[in-house]
Amino acid sequence: MSSQGEGKYQPLLDFLRQSDQLQVMLTFAEVEALLGEGLPASARSKRGWWSNRSKGALQATAWMSAGYMVEAIDLPEERVTFTKPPQVYRVQCVKNTLQWNSDLIRALRLHMGLSQAEMAQELGVRQQTVSEWEKGVYAPTRASSKYLTLVAEKAAFRYEVY
């Protein structure tokens, strides 16, 4: 079954690999036309189907293997936006501590192929904390920022300090 599933999303992988755009927006109908068959019902009703996870999701493996991440999903409009993340992220440093903002935390989590819950477990915080960081509700503490930096270095997350 695994090889059959990989084959199903191969046309999407090929399409994205051939794209030279940093951002690609497709309607669900366009994705279905690429695949030559309909998307599962869960793709139309559950945001999680479009999540960037590296385990157990052949569809995510397709776009991630092509170097893209799902940046936005609009279920009512049936649209998905794929984005190529930058090769190197820019991070501000204040008093020898990197300033981890919402975009950088999300980028690190996606780089590691983790869900928010898995990232929370990795960092020893609650899933809600990771979610609030990514939404910009509040920034990580200095201690959390230092730990995020260690995790980023271990995960070979590329960044430059400005």
Image (cartoon, grey):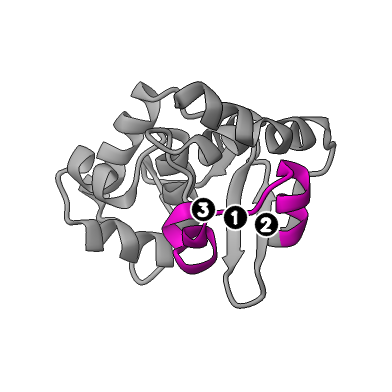
Q: Position of residue 89 (x, y in %)?
A: 58, 39
Q: Which residue is mark 2?
A: 81
- Nearer the observer: mark 1 or 3; the answer is 3
Amino acid type of disc 2? Thr
Instruction: From the image, tell me which residue sits under label 1.
Output: 71
**Residue 91 numbered tag:** none
Q: Is residue 141 left or right of residue 89?
A: left
In magenta, the rendered stretch is: 29-49
In the rendered image, the vertical position of residue 68 relative to residue 51, given as above or below: above
Q: Amino acid at mark 3?
A: Trp
Which residue has dot 3 on it? 50
Residue 39 part of the magenta segment: yes
Q: Secondary structure at mark 1?
A: strand
| Residue at 69% in and 33% down | 13
Q: Who comes first in sequence, dot 2 or dot 3?
A: 3
* Residue 11 inside the magenta-drawn segment: no
Q: Residue 119 location, x and y as percent?
A: 28, 43
Where is residue 99? Give x, y as percent: 42, 50
Q: Nearer the viewer, residue 93 or 55?
A: 55
Q: Residues at badges 2 and 1 in contact (C-beta under 8 Å)?
A: yes
Callout 1–callout 3 Cβ contact below 8 Å:
no
Label 2, secondary structure: give it: strand
Residue 130 drawn at (x, y percent)? 30, 56
